[in-house]
Structures are given as C-alpha cells and as structure tokens.
Image (cartoon, helix red, strand yellow):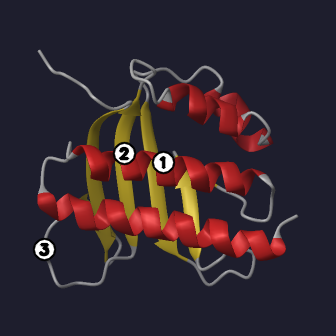
Amino acid sequence: MQVNFTGIKDPKIFLKRKGILSPYSTSDMKVHTIRMDCFLTDRTGNKDLSELKRITTNIPNLHEKYKNFTENDIFRLDISRSTAVQDFGYNIKFNNEDIQQWDNSIFGICTFICSITRTLLNKNTLESADMQKYIKAINIVADKIGKDCLNFVI
C-alpha cells in the first residue's frame, strides 16, 4: 500500500542536455530544460488536481485540455531558459503547451507551480536528495516570473 501525503504522486525529474532528455544525473553538462512529470490528485487537502483545472479555466489554449484531466493523466511541467522578449527569462510549458506570460493568468500559474514544488520540498517525498535541487530551481523560476510580472502585467 502506498501512502500519499500530498496531492502530487510519483514525481520524476528529467533534464535536457545537448538536446537529449534523460533522467536527472550529476553530470557537469549544462542543463537546458528541467522537466517534472507527476500525477495530481484531490485525495488530500491540497486539491492539486482541482487547482490545476481552476487556473486553466480562463486560458483558451489550456481550458479544453485540462477540463477533463484526471488523476490518471500525467502532468508535465517544462522550464527552460528563454531569450524571447515576451518571456521573463524562462519558458514554461504544461504538457508541451506554451504558457503565455503576458496574461493575468500567469499569476495563478506561478502560484500553482510554487505551491506544488514547495509541497514536494517540504514533505520529503522525493526519491532522491539530488531531485531537490531541480524542484527548488523550478520553484525559484516560478517565483521570479511571478514577481517580475507584478511590474508589467496588468
């Protein structure tokens, strides 16, 4: 029997280096993308699955994709560096869909990302201590984007 104390099940981290996506490792090569795959559920007080559906309600390209999302569907979050003017230094994708950062919905998205990463870090549910630094990096990026947006996005 698996006991789950968070609304996030089976988190996995993958890193993209030189165009190749692979499970995390301690390689010295530069990381271009951090990917987190997990399953979200409402079986805890956090209601992470419902929160994902709520924050995507007002985002046309995501609403249809997530309105029928279940705890059996994998949630994929990609964070990568971006030099695009419309991004705040990083690109965010939910299940391969770009997240538009110049939209009011970005605040909810960043809060959601910070919430699930903070939960993982605080509950010590990660399979490896090495995963913590990548989860923490995702948390820091989401926090940075959210704070930067406060100055520009109305």
- Mark 3 vs mark 1: which is more N-terminal? 3
Q: Callout 1 environment at 10 Å: few (<14), some (14 to 19), or many (20+)?
A: some
Seen at 65% across and 76% down, the residue is: 88
Q: Extreme right residue here?
A: 154
**On the image, numbered disc 1 is attached to which residue?**
115
- Mark 3 vs mark 2: which is more N-terminal? 3
- Lateral position of residue 143 relative to residue 19, left or right: right
Q: Position of residue 29 (x, y in %)?
A: 22, 84
Q: Secondary structure at mark 2?
A: helix
Q: Secondary structure at mark 1?
A: helix
Residue 90 sits in which quadrant? bottom right
Using the image, determine if residue 123 lies above or below residue 5: below
**On the image, numbered disc 3 is attached to which residue?**
26
Q: Callout 3 environment at 10 Å: few (<14), some (14 to 19), or many (20+)?
A: few
Find the distance from the CA under tag 1 to the CA under tag 2: 6 Å
Seen at 67% across and 39% down, the residue is: 55
Res 96 seen here: no
Are the residues tagged 1 and 2 within 8 Å (C-beta)?
Answer: yes
Q: Nearer the viewer, mark 3 or mark 2?
A: 2
Seen at 21% across and 59% down, the residue is: 131
Q: Secondary structure at mark 3?
A: loop
Which dot marks residue 119?
2
Seen at 35% across and 39% down, the residue is: 38
Along the viewing direction, whichever of 19 and 154 lies nearer the viewer: 154
